[in-house]
Amino acid sequence: MLNRQGRPTALNDTDGIDVKSSTFTGNRALAQIEPLIFEIGRPETTGVDFDEPDDFESRLGGLERQDPIGLPGLSEPETMRHYVRLSQMNYGIDTGLFPLGSCTMKHNPRLNERMARLPGFADIHPLQPVSTVQGALELMDELARYLLTLTGMSAVALSPKAGAHGELCGMMAIKAAIEARGEGATRRTVLVPDSAHGTNPATAALIGFVVKAVPARADGTVHVDDVRALLGPDIAAIMLTNPNTCGLFEPQIVEIAAAIHEAGGYFYCDGANFNAIVGKVRPGDLGIDAMHINLHKTFSTPHGGGGPGSGPVVLSDRLASFAPVPFVHRDGNEFTLVENKNDPAAVQSFGRITAFHGQMGMYVRALAFMLSHGSDGMRQASEDAVLNANYVRAGLSDLLSQPFGDRPCMHEVLFDDAWLKDTGVTTLDVAKALIDEGYHPMTMYFPLVVHGAMLIEPTESESKASLDLFIATMRDLAMSAKRGETERFSGAPYYAPRRRLDETRAARNPILTYTPPQPVAEAAE
Ligand SMILES: *Cc1c(COP(=O)(O)O)cnc(C)c1O
């Protein structure tokens, strides 16, 4: 047993399938198994060799730690191997197709990385005098100009650090606007469709709004009549995703915007799926008041394991003056930062939501992506993202079922699990079997309105050959499930470094500390 922290990891636990998995070392060919660093490290070992410090006087007033700290020590080559082996267990967009729907896992062009590492962008400090960072501020101003041009909006708050953070920023601007109208006490309801990303209702609730669900129609879209039925003097805003999480463009979005405005509310659009429409549609023309843009999705900056993302929010005329500080102000060729609400340019600002100015490295990458593609290239990227999703749809639609009928999708294609009926195989099983085939699974069980949802977003990065192999793999899995080969699925993944984990238990009851095993004699008592 390599791992003592309670996870079922055994390689020879094959659930009755004949997999030659138990090697002497636990390794599989060139895939190296790797225990926790605490299991291989020794407190007395170190990879560096410092001189003993001279006598010094502690200024901790007797509070210094007395016990050994117990950190695992490894030599330099052992450290190197530990982390390289762990990195090889990871799967990323640089490893292969990453069809995680709604996440837009596209290639991060290396040119962008190169630009982000330029010392004038990478090595600056947020507290430097603005006279020494004029180039960085100009880049932010230029990025803002591109975002406003692409969206047809009036202002942009660059500082939010993720899509969800952008939602918070946009909704706080809406809240400030409602309070400025003196309606803070009455306009407290936010409409959110059933199919929304969980961050939408969470954001609204977090800042004190009451969330009311708008039902989705049988065709997967939101109908203006269903919105109108819920409108009244209590409505602060609607949060609508477009293209929506079912991969469909909301056909009544203009009518919905008009209806919400007529009722005195604001239109928040979740723009995480902007990749489908860049250069094709300007959200400002649809009547949107606030929309976040995930630079780490649409504009190819890395997602980076929960951060650093970047979620700028574009705002309409009606909300522009409520934008958060800080923001860049351009005066001829000189750039300054509007840092607080005492500045006459920011009297209505709702305040500050980040310590400093946001994710500089992401700004550089996103602008490098925009400049290297140009307007025609960005439009083509969107078209290719939609084309690729529809290519996958066409390649699978005779075997897999689609909840809203076989019709064109935007940048992602949604299947349900009706095609798995009576096979004994579930959406989860298919996702796990995909791991054995060397793919990161698609998004599963989201959106919640579709039973056993499988949401596949190939992005524009994939070549036809790559899509063909993925489609062939999915077809093989589908036929295997329909032939009743349940063992291929029920215990999958068979070939991954870790087998099927109890993810619910891991999320609900995470073990975040390491407890050294009891010495054998003690444990026996
Ligand atoms: C990704 C996503 C979000 C949240 O964005 P983060 O950057 O992950 O916080 C919100 N809504 C939708 C539809 C998304 O796809």
Image (cartoon, helix red, strand yellow):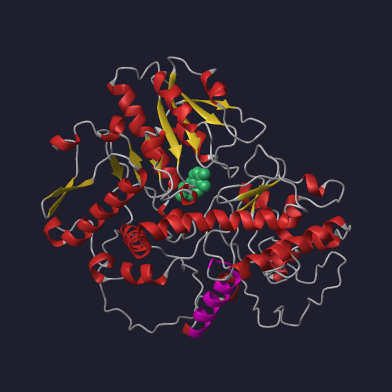
Segment tinted magenta in the rendering: 77-93
Q: Quadrant of residue 406?
A: top right
Above-or-below relation of 451 to 5: above
Picture coordinates of residue 133, whole percent (x, y): 17, 60
Above-or-below relation of 317 to 185: below
> For this rendering, which residue is in front, 406 or 458?
406
Q: Quadrant of the N terminus?
A: bottom right
User: Can residue 111 be seen at all in this image of the molecule?
Assistant: yes
Q: Residue at x 41, y 44 (%)?
A: 165
Looking at the magenta stretch, what is its main secondary structure? helix
Q: Residue at x 55, y 51 (%)?
A: 411
Picture coordinates of residue 361, whole percent (x, y): 33, 61
Picture coordinates of residue 196, whole percent (x, y): 55, 37
From the viewer's perspective, tell me whether residue 98 is left or right of residue 53: right
User: Can residue 158 be seen at all in this image of the molecule?
Assistant: no
Q: Count the marks: how many?
A: 0
Q: Residue at x 46, y 58 (%)?
A: 380
From the viewer's perspective, tell me whether residue 291 is left or right of residue 246: left
Picture coordinates of residue 327, whole percent (x, y): 23, 46
Answer whether residue 78 is magenta in the image.
Answer: yes
Answer whether residue 401 is magenta in the image.
Answer: no
Q: Quadrant of residue 7?
A: bottom right
Q: Quadrant of the C terminus?
A: bottom right
Q: Residue at x 58, y 45 (%)?
A: 247
> For this rendering, which residue is in front, 224 or 82?
224
From the viewer's perspective, tell me whether residue 69 is left or right of residue 524: left
